[in-house]
Amino acid sequence: MQNTKYVFVTGGVTSSLGKGIIAASLAKLLQARGFRVTIQKLDPYINIDPGTLNPYEHGECYVTDDGAETDLDLGHYERFLGIPTSQANNVTTGRIYQSVIDKERKGEFLGKTVQVIPHITDEIKERVQLLGETGEFDIVVTEIGGTVGDIESLPYIESVRQLLWEKGEENAIVIHLTLIPYLAAAGELKTKPTQHSVKSLMESGVSPDILVCRTEHHISDDIKRKLALFCNVNKEDVIESIDAETIYDVPILMLDQGLDKVVLKKLDLPLKSNPDLIKWNDFLIKHKSPTSEVEIALIGKYVELHDSYKSITEAFIHAGSSYATKVNVRWVHSENLDLSNYEEHLKDVDGILVAPGFGDRGIDGKIKAVQYARENNIPFFGICLGMQMAVIEFAKNVLGLKDAYSTEMKPNAENPVIDLMQSQKDVVNKGGTMRLGAWDCQLAEDSKSFKAYGKVNIQERHRHRYEFNNDYLADMEANGMIAVGKNPKADLVEVVEIPDHPWFVGVQYHPEYKSTVLNPHPLFVHFIKAALKYSNQK
């Protein structure tokens, strides 16, 4: 049996260079050559997971099938590779330390002093190799969060150093992503920041095997030779990563630069076949050469940071490519919507999506957006909190229950059409305690959702504490809002629709998490189809 190979991706000079995209692009190329590949993220912050982080702090919290609340980069991994990730694909410093402390409390260290080295680094190494030891993957790509030189990243870099020594140079390599800034006043690219970044990495005992250089301008052979000389790598191991039009161009750019070939050569692996990227290129052509456009209003509470809704905006891109359609997002802050201006904010859009969120801020604006979509026959899509707002709006304005609300915002609501789940009523801790991960749902065969999925039984990922209150179901359905999707065991309402509306769908789960480049999510595809139809009718 072939040993699993390991590729570590570190970053230097500055954050936000795109380690996750480079890691995902490399993994995509290796996968396209026939290798079994997965990616994991090691995050240096002390939170156990991103589940308790404010979206303004960290962007969206991504959720896996097995209920892990993870870094948003795992969404990129799944969208590029089309394979699910799990609890093992995202590890934080908080989780590492918690595990080591739990072992110490159980007496597993036999009275020894517990230290960063070897105990913390051993735990990190164990987590890194967890996926490799399953036998399911030929190559494990590990992205190290943060920037080389950060205090909190030092245990991870030391763990990489040890693994490089333990595995040997043909079984583990390091790719260092760095920045080559352009100084307009001097009219030239500068390599010194990269040299210092590599020097910092080497001071920790790790010498990069490959340099991937983010740049706004093409890197000349002279600069590559200079980087190779001063950073102790071969010239062919200096890879240019020029700014791309879209993140989905990056695998193609890395293919042109030969990143996958350099990696396979260093890992002593065969090239196998040429990479199969036919479907990927078809997607790119449709995405970059649209024949039509639609505008979707995204109603959210965190719209200042677009990464708060990263999976939704990427799902729009995937679905739009199905119809060679450019999806323009109109970002609408729900706090800014009120009786005096909601028509101004929402007029002329081809569809309205009310996004997920927590808390009472901006709720009334979301309710007004739902009402506008329902009364004007505009295609509507509500996700998680968005679905709950659709239920509240319908109860208020169709059933006449003016005090209808969710107990999340009004604990003593007289008509709690959305209420805390029974299983959540004794929960005190906030982290990792919601209804998380993939759950079953059965769809009614006469529904728009069934038409989208093409099957009755589906599984979708959840992240919520509150649910549709079934005490109000009969009145809702008698007045035109139908529960077309339910969890078969808990009888939890998962999907609501208004059959008399051209396209009005609310889902308690998060379909955006399962949308990928080559398999756009069917609900997003049908939502964009409805928006196109509405646009053409206008």
Image (spheres, helix red, strand yellow):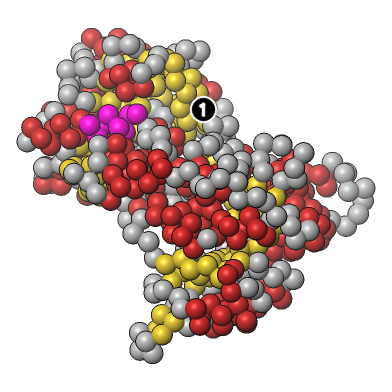
> Could you tell me residue 179's position as x and y percent?
49, 72
Tell me if 151 is positioned left or right of 286 in this view. Answer: right
Q: Which residue lies under the disc numbered 1?
A: 438
> Could you tell me residue 304's position as x and y percent?
32, 56
Q: Secondary structure at mark 1?
A: strand
The residue shown at (37%, 32%) is 521
* Furthest residue toward bottom: 186
Classed neighbour count for the residue bearing mark 1: other residues with Cα under 10 Å, few (<14), some (14–19), many (≥20): some
> Could you tell me residue 26's position as x and y percent?
54, 53
Q: Which residues are magenta?
A: 522-529
Foreground of the two, 474 or 416:
474
The residue shown at (54%, 60%) is 259
The residue shown at (50%, 52%) is 25
Foreground of the two, 3 or 79:
3
**Magenta stretch encompasses residue 452:** no
Residue 142 versus residue 489 in the image, above or below: below
Residue 306 versus residue 390 in the image, above or below: below
**Residue 317 occupies which quadrant of the picture?**
top left
> Could you tell me residue 52's position as x and y percent?
52, 46
For badge 1, the amino acid type reads Ala
The residue shown at (66%, 40%) is 137
What secondary structure is the magenta-colored segment mainly? helix
Q: Is residue 245 visible?
A: yes
Q: Which quadrant holds the C terminus?
A: top left
Q: Which quadrant holds the N terminus?
A: top right
Residue 402 versus residue 14 in the image, above or below: above
**Residue 503 occupies which quadrant of the picture?**
top left
* Furthest residue toward front: 273
**Magenta stretch encompasses residue 527:** yes
Tally the marks: 1
